[in-house]
Image (tube, helix red, strand yellow):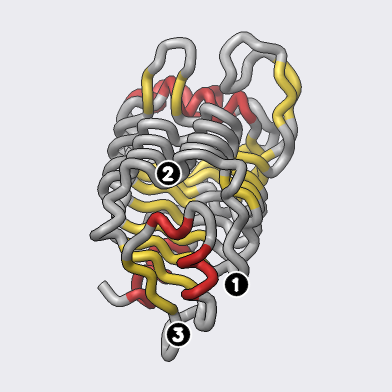
Amino acid sequence: MKRFGLWVSLFGIVLTGCSKNNEVAGNSSVVTVSTAGTLASLLGSSLKTRTILTVKGTIDARDFVTIRDSMPALTTLNLSSDTIAGYRGSLGTESSKNTIYPANTIPPFAFYNPATQTNKTSLSTISLPSTATAIGDSAFMNCSGLTAIAMSLNVVSIGNGSFYGCSSLTAFTIPPSVDFIGSYAFYHCSGLTSINVYTTTPIDLSQSISVFDGINANSCVLYVPVGTKSAYQAATGWSFFISISELGGGQAV
């Protein structure tokens, strides 16, 4: 696949073809959440069978619990038009802990339940809110069925273990806004064959351990901005990759 095509597929806004209202069409629908924390009541009895979902409006950590624990058939999730509100309480993704969940952050353990140690294996594609600025620790941990993620161009931080064990991902794009990647962020993402990085200065990984361990360093190509190859080859963590190539020419950079 050409790298431009990869960029388009990963950053495409629409992952589903859904109606423009809250009416269910088969197993797919668009739901508008006016009050954060009410997704479960809006979906009602269709929670168990819904396979495709586009959510608009405002959600918080409680709604991520609904998506994670109460929607076993969900494969495609589009949150691109969503806003994530802050939440403080014990009904969020970190089980019964009284936790502060910042706004515009994919919550820690969003798709991995630390209490039951179960992961969202059904989820194959997701589009993040365009306003999201951070991905919490272990957010997608062991989502082994995840094949594609459309990142927000506003993401600054990718937390510890965010994509730990996402073995079905074949490509990933790190937008130019990112300035932090935590330990084990891409640990054992064994299916990755390409990573596109759009930061002109290599992100400092000196305090983050095993960021890319478990990826095949020989077959996974790291694509970096024009003129930065030597910097990445010398940078801690990034030098892990045997093949580093520069994006350029007609590519979207």
| Crowd rating for badge 2 (residues with CA inside 10 Å; few <14, some 14–19, many 20+) | many
Total tally of numbered discs in the picture? 3
Between residue 179 and residue 238, name the one nearer to us: 238
In the rendered structure, find residue 180 and report the number of the disc placed on it.
none
Quarter of the rendering containing residue 159: top right
**Marks 3, 1: nearer the viewer:** 1
Circles 3 and 1, Cβ within 8 Å, touching? The answer is no
> Residue drawn at (65%, 11%), measured in percent from left and top?
97
In the rendered structure, find residue 186 and report the number of the disc placed on it.
2
- SS at badge 1: loop
Q: Is residue 105 left or right of residue 194?
A: right
Decide if residue 218 is in sight here: yes
Specify which label sits upstream in the sequence, 3 or 2. Answer: 2
Q: Label 3 vs label 2: CA separation?
A: 25 Å
**Residue 50 screen position, x and y as percent:** 35, 33
Decide if residue 162 is in sight here: no
Q: Is residue 79 left or right of residue 172?
A: right
> Residue drawn at (25%, 59%), measured in percent from left and top?
218
| Crowd rating for badge 1 (residues with CA inside 10 Å; few <14, some 14–19, many 20+) | some
Q: Label 3 vs label 1: CA separation?
A: 13 Å
- SS at badge 3: loop
> Residue drawn at (42%, 21%), measured in percent from left and top?
70
Specify which label sits upstream in the sequence, 1 or 2. Answer: 2
- SS at badge 2: loop
> Residue drawn at (71%, 13%), measured in percent from left and top?
98
Quarter of the rendering containing residue 146: top left
Q: Amino acid at mark 2?
A: Phe
Q: Which residue is mark 3?
A: 248
**Residue 63 screen position, x and y as percent:** 57, 28
In the rendered structure, find residue 200 and report the number of the disc placed on it.
1
**Residue 142 screen position, x and y as percent:** 36, 31
